[in-house]
Image (cartoon, rainbow, N blue to C red):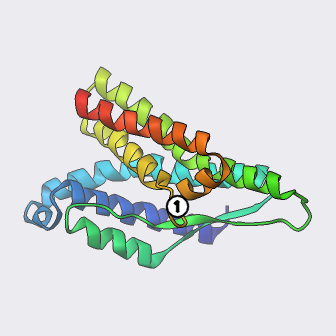
Amino acid sequence: MQIKELRDLTVSAVVLALAFGIALSGGLKAFGQPASLLRVAGMAFAAVSTSFILHELAHRLIARNSGYFAEYAMWPAGLMIALGSSLLGFIFAAPGAVVIRHNPGVFTTPEQHRRNIGMISIAGPATNIILALVFMVLNIAHPALLFYLGAFINTWLAIFNLLPFGPLDGAKIFWWSKTAWGAAIGAAGLLYLAQGYLF
């Protein structure tokens, strides 16, 4: 991993964790209780470190295994939007993305390319769904803020990224396979409902 890519991942994770900490602490009201904000932001950082970073690395791994050039690059404007929205008590996160470029030495048919892009795109949300399940089980066995946030953040990231619009993963998955998209969004939705019931 190049230094620039490592820097972009680290900065994105820190800013995203701070945004989640602010939003989950009530937005602007969070600054009235700095100790609580720091505690929630710290826990959010631990959860984001697994959810966001592993999401992006999953994209990167599948892309590279499929013969594409792939590297994470942060989007500074998206990070500012995440921080700005967190002040209002919610998160709109577009911190960056894994940039994928076709390797001229690897030939793929249009059908293969569409399948590859679909598989690369679904890898991130699938990782979040698996992590959300793990954190849910841990929270049931031993309730803790860290496990609750891990389940919540991973579920939120899965649902958000599966929206079938614009540059989000969901649009590429939907373009490749509506069945795969339906299964993924269905699983993420069930996790969200289960957390509301269990937690």
Q: Identify which residue is drawn at 56% across, 58% down.
A: 171
* Residue found at the far top of this picture: 141
- Locate residue 80, reporting x and y percent: 36, 75
Q: Secondary structure at mark 1?
A: loop
The amino acid pointed to by label 1 is Leu
Q: Check the image and report above or below for 144 versus 172.
A: above
- Locate residue 63, reporting x and y percent: 72, 54
Q: Residues within 10 Å of mark 1 (few under 14, many from 20)?
A: some
Q: Identify which residue is drawn at 70% across, 49% down.
A: 62
* Residue found at the far bottom of this picture: 77
- Locate residue 122, reporting x and y percent: 60, 47
- Locate residue 155, reporting x and y percent: 39, 43
Q: Is residue 199 visible?
A: no
Left or right? Give the position of 90 relative to 13: left
Left or right? Give the position of 138 relative to 174: left
Q: Check the image and report above or below for 99 versus 131.
A: below
Q: How many marks?
A: 1
Quarter of the rendering occupied by the N terminus: bottom right
Q: Nearer the viewer, residue 172 or 126?
A: 172
Quarter of the rendering occupied by the C terminus: top left
Q: Nearer the viewer, residue 76 or 174?
A: 174
* Residue found at the far left of this picture: 32
Identify the residue under disc 1: 168
Q: Identify which residue is drawn at 91% across, 59% down.
A: 107
* Residue found at the far front of this picture: 178
Q: Identify which residue is drawn at 34% across, 68% down.
A: 82
Q: Nearer the viewer, residue 178 or 153?
A: 178
Q: Is residue 77 visible?
A: yes
